[in-house]
Every structure is written in C-alpha cells, then in structure tokens.
Image (tube, coloured by chain):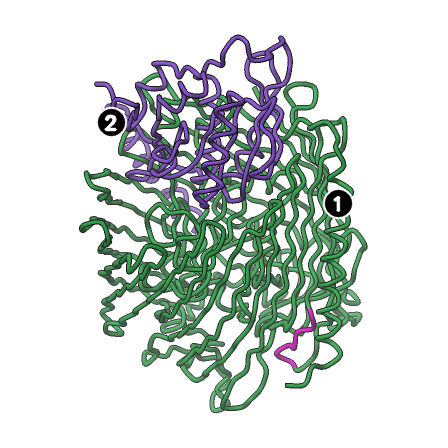
C-alpha cells in the first residue's frame, strides 16, 4: 500500500513537471477566481486614480477623498467594503451610504444603483453641479447621463465612458483610462476603443 | 399541522437572535472612524490586470451573477474564513442555512436539507475544486474535514449551489454542488508562513508562495503539515475492566499533509494537489479491539488537471479539461490481540476529459453544451489478514462512463429568464440515467429576484456498494441508480441599508435510495435500493452589511422528512436550525471580532435514541497586519462547553458519539 502510494505521488510529480514545462512556453492573459462584484469594486477604486477634478474643488492636501454609495446591491456592498481601508495617494478614502435625494456637496465620486429614470436624472444633475464622478452598472448607465458604466462581456468586466458627461461635471478622464474603455461616448457620438 | 412546543422554541430563538443582531448592529453603527479593514482583495491590481480577470460561478458552468444562477446559492469568502476562524470546509458549511455536519471521530459528513447518511461519505454531494470533480472512483466519496484536499487558508471562496444539478454535472450532484475556488498567485503576491497551535496537542504549519511573473504566468505553490495527538475519550459502552474501563487513551491522533500547485497563463490553467491523512480510531468501531493503537485509517487523494478556455466572439466560449486522479485508502483494523491488523485497501485511478461550449443565439438565447468522458482504469478493493495470510476479498475492476448535456437560457421577456437543461449519462453497468432541470428566474427590479426550479438528479451506485464483499459484507450486482426530484421556490431581495433577505421553500422526493441492510439470512451487510424519502422545508435568511466592517447573517431552516411507506422520520435529521454570524471591528485596533452561533434541534439515531438539540457558539479574533507583516488569529470553539453528540452510522457500538467541548486555536501568519 505504502509503496503504491509513493509511486503514485511520483507519477503525479512527473506529470506536474511535464505540464509545467509545457505551460511556461504559453502566452498569457487570464486569471480566474473572483466574484463579479469584487472585481467591479476594484475597478471603481482604479477609476478614482484616472480622473482629474477641477483645481478649484476644495482639495486640501490630506483631506479625505469622499465616495458615496447610492442604492443597494452586491456591487454597491462590495465597493463600500473594498474602498473602506483604501487611500488615493496620501488622501484616505471616506465611504458612506447616501439616499438618492441627498446633497452631493463635498463628495468626489458616487457609485449609483438606481433604476427609476426620474431619480437618476436628479442624481446626475446634482452630481454635475457638485463636480462628482458618477459610476454605475449596465450599458444604459452612460447613455442616460452617468460618466462610467461597468458591464460584463465574455466573462470579463468592461466599462463605458461618456466623456461629455465628464466634461459637464468639470472632470477630466485620463487618456490611459480611455484607452482601456469598451465604448467612449461623447457629444460627437460613439466611437470604438482607440486602437 | 399542530405546532409543538419545540417548534415555538426554535421560532422564538430565531426572533430573539434577529433582535440581538439588529441591536448589536445599531450599536456598531455609531460613527467611529473607519478601522483598517482586513485585506480582503489584492489591493495592488491595476486596470490592465483587472481587465484579465474572469468571473466564475459553478451554478450553470459559466460566469454569472449569483442572483442569475438557477439555484439557491451561498458564497463564503476567504475574508470570512480568516475572520471567523473556520478550520475546515466542514466549519464553513455548518454556518449555511440547510446544511449541518456530523462527525464519527474519523470523518465529517455533510447533511443537507434534513438528509445525512454517515455511511455515504458525502457521495450525495458533488465537491469541485476550481471546477474539477474531487469525488473519487471507488466510493464516490469526498471529504470536508481536515481530510479535504486543500488547506482552508488557500480558499478564495466556497460557492454552494443547493438542489439537484445532475442536469449539468451527472452523478453525485444530488443534494448540492460545492465549488471551492482557491487563491491565485496574484492574490498571495509573495510568501506566507503560518504556524498554528490548537487544542488536543495539535500543531500545524503552512508555507505558501505565489506571484504573477512579468510574462503573466500566475503561480501558486503551498504545502501544509499537521500533527495532533488527539484526546483521551471515555465511551460508557466499553466501560468494563477488559476494555480499559471505557477510556480510549492516545488513539485519537490525526496527522496530514497537503500540497497544492496552480499555474495559469493565457487561456491555460493547471492545478495539481495531493492530500494524505492518517487518523486513529478511538471508537472501537466495526468490531475492532477497543483502545488499540494499531487501528487507523489513511486516506490519500491526488488530482491534476490542465484546462484550456477560450472566449469566443459574441459571448460564446469553449473550454476543455484533461484530468487524472488517484485515491488510495488503507484501513488497518485490529481484530485480534496479536499480529498485524486486518488490512482494508481501496485504490482508484482514473483519467478523463471534459468539453464545454457556449454560444449566444441572437439576443435572447444562450446555449451551453458539453460532454464528459471518464475512464476508471483501476478499481481495487482488497481485504486481508497479513499474518497468517487470509484473503477475504480481492476485487479488481475498471469501467468507463460518459455523459452529454445541454442547457438553454432563454430571455422570455426582459425580467424573465427560462433555463432548461438535460443530461444523459452512460454507464456500462446501469444503463443511461436521464436528468432534466428547468428554472424560471424573474427579476422585477435590481433588488428583487424570484426563482422557480424543478429538477431531477441521480446517484449511480459505486464500486463499493455493488461489489464490496468480506466476512461482514456481501455484494449486490443488481443495484441501480437512486433518484431525487426537487421542486423549489426562492425569493431574494435587497431591502436597503445593506440588508438582503432570502427565502427558499423546497420539496424533495427520493426514490430507490441505496441503503445498507443486515440480511437476517446470513448476517451480512448488503446495499439495496429499498427506501423512498419525502421531505419538505423552508429556509429563511438575512444578510447584513452595514459598512465599516460590520456584517451579520441570520438564518432559520425548517425541514420535515419521512419515509412515506413507513411514515417514520429520518434519522440524523434536525427539524429546526437557527444560525447567526456577526462580525465587527474592534475600534482603533484594526482587528475584527466575530461570533458564530448554531442551534440544531434533536435528531433521532439508528438505535432509536435521541441526540439532544444544542447550541454551539464560537468566538474569534483576527488582527491583520499587526507589526506590519503578521496576521494573528485566535478562536474559541464551543465556547460554552456544551455537551452534545452526533448520531453515527452502522458498525459502531455507540449510538451517539460525544463531540468536543470547548477548544481553541491560535495562528500566526507571516507575510513576506
């Protein structure tokens, strides 16, 4: 018995070595292992690094960077959870929940889950006035006035950016982010991702 | 149906728990500065890395949000495992609505929705490791205790899909499919060395290393070793001068090692793992000499697989997996005072290939189809006394199986999805079981989901059930597959404030249940398809995430099972379970504290006795990145030292096996 099990282990090791050798020559681009909402939360965090807010907006060094979560859902929960302990440069992130009709003064970014078109319109209006980056889910998020919309394609998370909505709020989206965008929308219409 | 006192007690326990959790959440809600939260996700991933991540959920074999999976799904994450001090998969599963675990002091057995047969070694559950079947080929068994394939610290998440899934996975996907997803090299991003000390002289160590190389090769390698001397145990059934007055001394030892290697690059992913565990048997079971150190079991499982997956244009995908496995069991049973013990040996070796393809048709249909082939090329069961040599059984066999399946997801209207699936399996010995499944998912808004499911699943009899024959057992070549039919309704809703509520109602009917009987004609045990079981029940759950690291879960499960022919309630089947978990940060320390409590009502036993209802409470502290590079965790299990026991399978003198009282575990993890 013991003998048999040793030889079995040996053949597994051999198989492992052969496969590892095969693998090391192969080109790569995928990993697996995380839930959709967790991955989306990490996207949200990254977006904050690639957007510039107007200089006039009340940024004192070391002031917290304020993100609000409007609405409920798995991605909203994961985003709140993920951002809690994070910082953007020297600036700690402050995350809190907000109702759709609450003021967005002093807020930098909002993750929005809202289906009601009227409420959404109101949120986007308030966000543009207060220079707030709006991030949400689904293709319709950017077509209805949001700045960045997350979605899933081919099992991978992708995002759309509406540059005119960003401009409207006085935000500048870095070209590095736009280069990774699935669809860039702007007042001049739709375009595919830059090649 | 009249409601007996017991049920009221369970319902009031649920309500009191709900009030307590709400109250503690209200307290925890007070504005404190956000504490440093445990690192849950890799914090260093940039956008390029994120764009490459694939989202996986096993429920319908392709990536989906769990609310879209046509089943009632629970997910437990790495963060919860660390923060709540879960030692094994068994610890994870016993926190979930509808699940419970019993232990016979050797193996742990899953109970789902009122059904638990210790003697099936979990073969009515399909347990996947990153999508790869871990159930072996001789007993179809799979393990959830320390004998499980990977160290609990390496689990990224556990996805639990309730209900019959044979329509996708074939045999063993009877009550549930559990997919354990392991961490990646990226999530480790360096090395970890963990050292653990626990009650009953248990010491273990783990060394892991993982990273992504510049050429995008993601690698993880990890090894764990553990050794425990176990407890001295008293069994009144053996309280006689000849059997050490019922005290089993130094016979409860457990030691194991586990190795996991994963690598992924591009569309390829590779995994290999091996586990070997040795356990002493302190219970004097199967007629062995009580308190004899020679009696022990050794279980070893090794698996390796290489998978290729490619996303196709318009939402389709193609994947294939080549895999091989080996299971070796050695039971050493001391029946005689002298000489080497009786040897009970099983060896299974197999290889197989899976193929999955998915294609989107128009904007409304998504079709998945696949095929599996498996060659169990070596199936050995031997039983002998080495000296003087007597061979009681020597069975050698081999067989192939294959299955094909298809599932269509049809968008009937915008918020209404229909899933329809069918699988046909081919067994040389028992023909071709056909298993259909259908589900309707209605999503009236982003916060609400309703699911209606109907399905059928099967479990083919295994090599052991059909062919095992010794001086105590006899074979039954006429065994056929058993079946389950399930109807289930699920409602889930986010009600605001980070609270999600869910309810599931189910009805199960099992036919041709394979069960072990003692044949009065010859005094031998034999497996027969004799029983029919009906069960129905309800699961209510509440998940709370109040932000700032405050989370909680509360659930109540009700289930009633009986044999409709005899109208006798099932053994080892608790009518009520109430479970609560609460986790909150300790202000200004960066640490988290958690409380887990599980109530289970009484269970009847094979011997007609009753294992009393009980509540277990576990307390854990977790301090991540203390002194920069160390995680500390400390847990107290069964904190109130509650005395309780589990019903056990045939072959034991005991009818109920007393479980551990208060015990602890402390662990330090160094990150480098």
Closer to the observer: label 1 or label 2? Answer: 2
Disc 1, SS? helix
Q: Which residue is mark 2?
A: A190
The quarter of the displayed image where residue A23 is located:
top left
Write down the chain letter for disc 2: A
From the rendered image, report the letter of the chain displayed in green: B
Residue at (34, 64) in percent of width and height: B166
From the rendered image, report the letter of the chain displayed in purple: A
The quarter of the displayed image where residue B539 is located:
bottom right
Label 2 Cα crowd, 10 Å radius (few <14 / some 14-19 / many 20+): few
Please tell me which residue lies in front, B302 or A61: A61
Please tell me which residue lies in front, B386 or B137: B137
Label 1 Cα crowd, 10 Å radius (few <14 / some 14-19 / many 20+): few
Q: Which residues are magenta?
A: B601-607
What is the number of the mark on residue B26? Answer: 1
In the displayed structure, does residue B577 sit left or right of residue B263?
right
Mark 1–mark 2 distance (CA, rounded to whole Å): 47 Å
Pinpoint residue B593: horizontal percent, then vertical percent: 73, 39
A6 above or below B266? below
């Amino acid at each position: 018995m013991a003998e048999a099990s040793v030889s079995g282990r040996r053949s597994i090791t051999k198989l492992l070595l052969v496969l590892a050798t095969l693998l090391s020559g192969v080109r790569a681009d995928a990993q697996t292992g995380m839930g959709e909402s967790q991955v989306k939360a990490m996207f949200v965090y990254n977006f904050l690094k690639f957007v510039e807010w107007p200089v006039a907006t009340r940024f004192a060094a070391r002031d917290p960077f304020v993100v609000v979560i409007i609405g409920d859902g798995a991605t909203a929960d994961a985003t709140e959870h993920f951002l809690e302990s994070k910082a953007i440069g020297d600036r700690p992130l402050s995350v809190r929940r907000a109702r759709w009709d609450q003021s967005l003064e002093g807020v930098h970014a909002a993750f929005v889950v809202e289906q009601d078109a009227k409420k959404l319109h109101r949120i986007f209006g308030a966000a543009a006035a207060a220079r707030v980056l709006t991030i949400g889910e689904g293709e319709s998020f950017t077509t209805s006035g949001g700045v960045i919309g997350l979605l899933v394609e081919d099992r991978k998370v992708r995002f759309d950016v509406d540059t005119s909505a960003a401009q409207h709020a006085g935000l500048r989206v870095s070209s590095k982010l736009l280069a990774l965008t699935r669809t860039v929308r702007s007042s001049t219409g739709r375009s595919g991702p830059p090649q | 149906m009249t409601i007996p006192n017991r049920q009221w007690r369970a319902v009031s326990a649920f309500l009191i728990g709900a009030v307590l959790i709400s109250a503690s959440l209200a307290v925890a809600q007070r504005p404190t500065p956000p504490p440093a939260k445990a690192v849950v996700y890799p914090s260093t991933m940039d956008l390029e890395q994120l764009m490459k991540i694939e989202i996986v959920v096993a429920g319908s074999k392709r990536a989906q949000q769990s609310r879209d999976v046509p089943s009632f799904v629970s997910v437990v994450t790495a963060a919860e495992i660390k923060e709540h001090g879960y030692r094994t998969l068994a610890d994870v599963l016993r926190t979930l609505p509808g699940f419970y675990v019993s232990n016979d002091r050797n193996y742990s057995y899953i109970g789902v929705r009122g059904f638990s047969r210790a003697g099936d070694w979990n073969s009515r559950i399909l347990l996947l490791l990153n999508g790869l079947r871990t159930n072996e080929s001789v007993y179809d068994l799979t393990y959830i205790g320390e004998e499980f394939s990977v160290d609990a610290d390496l689990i990224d998440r556990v996805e639990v899909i309730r209900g019959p899934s044979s329509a996708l996975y074939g045999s063993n996907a009877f009550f549930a499919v559990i997919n354990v997803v392991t961490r990646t090299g990226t999530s480790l991003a360096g090395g970890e060395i963990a050292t653990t000390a626990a009650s009953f002289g248990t010491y273990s160590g783990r060394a892991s290393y993982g990273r992504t190389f510049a050429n995008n090769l993601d690698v993880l390698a990890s090894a764990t070793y553990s050794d425990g001397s176990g407890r001295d145990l008293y069994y009144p059934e053996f309280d006689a001068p000849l059997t050490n007055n019922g005290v089993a001394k130094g016979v409860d030892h457990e030691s194991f090692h586990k190795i996991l290697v994963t690598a992924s690059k591009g569309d390829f992913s590779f995994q290999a793992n091996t586990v070997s565990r040795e356990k002493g048997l302190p219970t004097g079971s199967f007629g062995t000499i009580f308190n004899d150190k020679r009696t022990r079991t050794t279980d070893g499982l090794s698996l390796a697989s290489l998978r290729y997956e490619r996303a196709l244009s318009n939402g389709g995908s193609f994947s294939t997996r080549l895999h091989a496995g080996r299971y070796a069991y050695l039971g050493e049973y001391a029946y005689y005072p002298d000489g080497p013990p009786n040897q009970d040996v099983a060896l299974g070796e197999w290889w197989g290939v899976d193929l999955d393809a998915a294609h989107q048709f128009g904007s409304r249909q998504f079709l998945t189809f696949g095929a599996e082939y498996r060659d169990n090329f070596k199936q050995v069961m031997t039983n002998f006394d080495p000296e003087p040599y007597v061979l009681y059984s020597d069975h050698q066999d081999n067989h192939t199986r294959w299955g094909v399946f298809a599932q269509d997801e049809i968008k009937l209207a915008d918020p209404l999805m229909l899933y329809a699936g069918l699988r046909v399996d081919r067994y040389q010995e028992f023909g071709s079981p056909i298993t259909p499944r259908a589900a309707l998912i209605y999503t009236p808004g982003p916060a609400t989901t309703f699911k209606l499911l109907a399905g059928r699943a099967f479990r083919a009899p295994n090599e052991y059930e059909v062919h095992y024959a010794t001086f105590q057992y006899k074979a039954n070549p006429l065994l056929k597959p058993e079946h389950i039919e399930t109807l289930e309704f699920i409602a889930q809703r986010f009600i605001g404030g980070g609270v999600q509520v869910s309810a599931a109602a189910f009805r199960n009917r099992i036919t041709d249940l394979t069960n072990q009987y003692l044949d009065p004609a010859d005094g031998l045990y034999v497996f027969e398809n004799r029983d029919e079981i009906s069960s129905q029940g309800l699961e209510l759950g509440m998940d709370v995430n109040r932000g700032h690291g405050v989370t909680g879960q509360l659930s109540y499960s009700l289930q009633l099972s009986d044999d409709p022919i005899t109208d006798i309630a099932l053994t080892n089947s608790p009518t009520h379970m109430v479970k609560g978990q609460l986790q909150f940060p300790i202000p200004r320390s960066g640490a988290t504290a958690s409380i887990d409590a599980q109530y289970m009502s009484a269970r009847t036993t094979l011997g007609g006795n009753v294992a009393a209802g009980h509540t277990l409470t576990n307390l854990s502290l977790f301090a991540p990145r203390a002194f920069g590079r160390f995680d500390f965790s400390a847990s107290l299990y069964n904190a109130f030292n509650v005395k309780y026991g589990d019903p056990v399978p045939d072959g034991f003198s005991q009818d109920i096996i007393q479980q551990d009282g208060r015990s602890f575990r402390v662990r330090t993890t160094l990150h480098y």
